[in-house]
Amino acid sequence: MASFHRFSVVGNLTRFKAIRSMQSHKACCLQFSTSTSARSSHDYLHESILPTMHFQAGLPRLPIPKLDKSCQRYLASQEVMLDADAFEHTKKVVEAFEKNEGQSLNSDLIANDKQNKHTSYVSDRWFHIYLADRVPVVLNYNPFMCYKNDERPEYNDQLIRATNLTVAALKFMKTLRANKLDPEVFHLNPAKTDTPGFKKIARWIPSSLAAYYAILNKAFPLDMSQYFRLFNSTRVPQLGKDVLKTEPSGKHLLVVRNGHLYTFDVLDRDGNIVPPAEIQAHLQYILKDNTPPPEHPLGYLTTENRDIWASLRTQLVNTSARNTEVLDKIDTAVYCLCLDETAPEEAEDMNRNMLYGDGANRWFDKSFQLIICKNGLTACNFEHSWGDGVAVLRFFNETFKYTTETPSISPSSAPASIDSSQCVSRIQLDLDPQVKEGIKTARQKYMDYTGSLNVETKQSFSFGKDFLKSNKVSPDSVMQLAFQMGFYKLTGKVAGTYESCSTAAFRHGRTETIRSATKETKMCSQAFMEGSGVTDAEKRSLMQMCSDKHNQITKEAAMGQGWDRHLLALRFLAQDKELTPDIFTDPAYAAICHIIISTSTLSSPAVMAGGFAPVVPNGFGVGYGILDNEHGVNITSYPASYNVKDYVECVMGSLNQIHDVLQATSNSN
């Protein structure tokens, strides 16, 4: 069976190809109410000229690619991985599918799509993949993004940063729900369209037509249907398939420290944000709580197999009415704030702490967790089923901007004179022997599988985007080429490779895969092998071919013209009809969907680093970044994979070779 395990990761969320959209309900669930009384403008980050969801109704629908085009693209991806005989077999299988079962399945897919114009043809299936998977969410799904530190060291104090980020998060939530958050738009010509004038005109155009007006002016509104899941949301374990629970009426924050769970209200009865000094006082109270860590920390339950966790949750609910009430309190909290006792200094320690950390001090089922260490190092770890990251990065960037430019409190600010013991509740559940044993078992399994993860990080200041752009090659294509070259040096093979691409320009578009292992990257990898006899000029020409090809397949994917999602939808339809087309039982299909190199990149002024675990036991989780004058990788693996240190050295060595060739040929010109 092909592996579709954790198919989407954070991705390059700052560029059009990497901003992801999210499936949602039939009607747009983001029709925010503005009827609540006592709304203070001080509670908003800003007040947009355009309503947040102004473009949503008019977003174009995700196209279903032509069947013959998907088959051609699929074969092009397979050709680079298979030997001649295997490729000839797969080619015949694909041709037969295109002429026979594929025709009827594709017709059914098109018919179903026409009956569900509120969404996209991939949305429900994609959503199902996440929620039906029974593996633990930690490592298998949840990625992290680490904030850059505030340039003012005193603002990185744990209490100061936690307070300011909490207020910033609440302001973001209030701005969003009041429909005052700027719509998410990708501007090809910001000077023309990212302006008050453009927005004022767009505001007077009906919502059903506003997106078309924007697109005509080369401004591309992006799907925002996932945003409503950001706050007051959690993934609730159930046997067979989990569900998402969102309750916007929740006014409290969930805080985890030393394995204890606390809650306190951050919104008053009218929905206004509690004064920052009071939030500061409550967090200070929690930080000073010297209660010994619990013997059975509840957080470990969220690290379990989903069916096991579902059974234990049912046991908790059946034990007492108080447990039901407490679990609902956790589920409906605005978000989860983790106050860690750790203070990571090294890159590897930071990656481990933010990717999984102390399972006792986490609640991995919440839509997102803000993790703040003793030294102020902060990250966002988010549950992946509800969305693909677009909302998370927007939240990330907005909160970083607010806390670094207009923070609510300063190091000289005094906490409010308030009795926090009357406002802060430490969560207590009634645990029977079965649940206690379940927590004990979950903790041991957690220690075992997180302990098996390898992490390797490297950074180089030898060159970055500026150098590559001056040499007229795409920076992202160079990084992807280096991953291919590194793997080829290490193994002499080409691996199934995944690079996520946003289809957020379409309603509920989700993502498409950029299959960055191409015929061009294979030829280039071979040319850079020692003793190849290929000249620098020829290598540069091959690199240009790789860049051009990568740009092409990126554009195709962004327009919904990849093959992965189309074939996935057809495979699910075949299963529904109890059909088994040869294309899906062909070993080549399983092999190419077994993602050995899963890649994701972040480039944002707010982001220090990001990371995730491999998606298969013998694969690599490749987080990478390339800035103006530097680049780096953050790569994870398990024992079943090739040595991660060796792979990182091969990748960084390949990047150095690429730099040297570009520099040499540039000088010669």
Image (tube, helix red, strand yellow):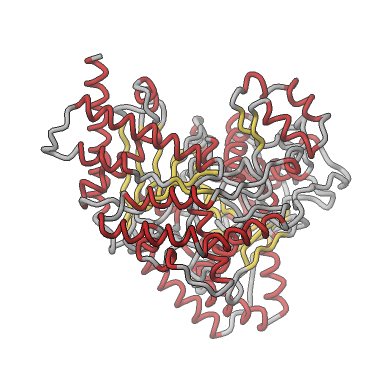
- Residue 162: name its quadrant: top right
Q: Residue furthest left?
A: 531
Q: Quadrant of the N terminus?
A: bottom left
Q: Quadrant of the C terminus?
A: top left
Foreground of the two, 418 or 494:
494
Pinpoint residue 638: horizontal percent, then vertical percent: 32, 61
Task: Name the residue at 24% across, 52% down.
Answer: 493
Task: Name the residue at 24% across, 20% down.
Answer: 665
Pinpoint residue 667: horizontal percent, then vertical percent: 24, 15
Image height of 104 relative to 444, above or below:
above
Image height of 258 relative to 494, above or below:
below
Task: Name the residue at 61% across, 39% down.
Answer: 399
* Res. 458 visible in picture: no
Pinpoint residue 431: horizontal percent, then vertical percent: 59, 80
- Tell me if 259 is positioned left or right of 444 in this view: right
Image height of 505 relative to 358, above or below:
above
Foreground of the two, 589 or 627:
589
Task: Name the residue at 79% across, 42% down.
Answer: 178
